[in-house]
Amino acid sequence: MQLHLTRPIIFFDLETTGVDVSRDHIVELCYIKRHPNGNEESKTLRIRPADSLGGTLPIPESSTAIHGITDADVAACPTFRELSDELLQTFQGCDLAGFNSNKFDIPLLVEEFLRCGKNLELQGCHFVDVQNIFHKMEQRTLVAAYRFYCQKELTDAHSALADTRATLEVLEAQLDRYADTLQNDVAFLADFSAMNRNIDFAGRYVRDAEGREVINFGKHKGRLVADVFPRDPGFVSWILQGDFPLNTKQVTQMLALKYKKH
């Protein structure tokens, strides 16, 4: 079943220097952008990880062992900052999809933009995490998902393009297999594939059943932001000055302003 769209959706996959959203960087980004009329455009970009001054950051051997990308492979490649305008134009206003994308790929992509002083505005966009659909329905990995749903072997796993294409094919196969459960609608799929109601991408803040902002970590875990922030400004300062993702700090500032004690 072909995915029904009302606006463009981007399936994307990242290869990175590691798995820490606060510290790690993208070394390869592959995307497939599908439009409502069925047209597609795809691109694979190698990216030189760099610090705020443009100096090259090394790719750990442990990461290279997973995705096969070395320092030499990206030595002559542009930095994310150099690609940020192009990527912002590509991603802005699109729904996003991937495999484990809600937990890792989307937060890291947003973080990379924020490091460049740019904001990928995703308000109103839907996030479809194919892994979460798969785990809710079958409990498997991407390689097993591809075999299970598409009857194919993913022979080039951890290649960004292969993983991205497989993710798109798996979602369309899921729509066929679970036609009585899944709706061919990106808004429904985004809601179905969400594991929680995060406010920031790292899940430090979530919404409860009534839509209220709740702290999801630390000494105030489980308490309402509205109760904590006006009474414990030190907690807010600790977050803003600490080693948290820029997106988490951005949301903290927004919530602090909303619940500023007058």
Image (cartoon, rainbow, N blue to C red):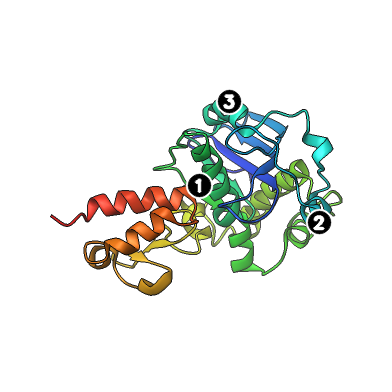
Q: CA distance from mark 2 to mark 1?
A: 24 Å
Side of 34 relative to 185 (left or right): right
Q: Position of residue 6 (x, y in %)?
A: 48, 37
Picture residue at 69% right of the left edge, 47% below the top: 16
Residue 187, image x, y percentages? 46, 49
Judging by the rendered image, the residue that carries numbered circle 1 is 186
Secondary structure beneath label 1: helix
Q: How many marks?
A: 3
Residue that label 2 marks: 151
Residue projecting furthest to the left: 262
Tell me the residue at 55%/61% (across/down): 180
Quarter in which the C terminus is drawn: bottom left
Residue 183 visible from this viewpoint: yes
Q: Residues within 10 Å of mark 2 (few under 14, many from 20)?
A: few
Q: Are marks 2 and 3 in contact (CB under 8 Å)?
A: no
Q: Disc 1 marks which amino acid?
A: Val
- Answer left or right for 137 relative to 207: right
Label 1 environment density (alpha carbons within 10 Å; few <14, some 14–19, many ≥20)? many
Give the mark nearest the N terminus, 2 or 1: 2
Q: Which mark is residue 86?
A: 3
- 85 relative to 66, above or below: above
Percent across and percent down for residue 212 are 29, 63
Does any portion of residue 211 appear in the rendered image?
no
The kind of secondary structure element at disc 3 is: helix
Report how far apart the C-alphas of labels 3 and 1 lie in the structure. 25 Å
Instruction: Using the rendered view, name the quadrant where residue 40 is placed.
Output: top right
What residue type is disc 2 on?
Answer: Gln
Q: Closer to the N terminus: mark 2 or mark 3?
A: 3
Q: Earlier in the sequence, mark 3 or mark 1?
A: 3
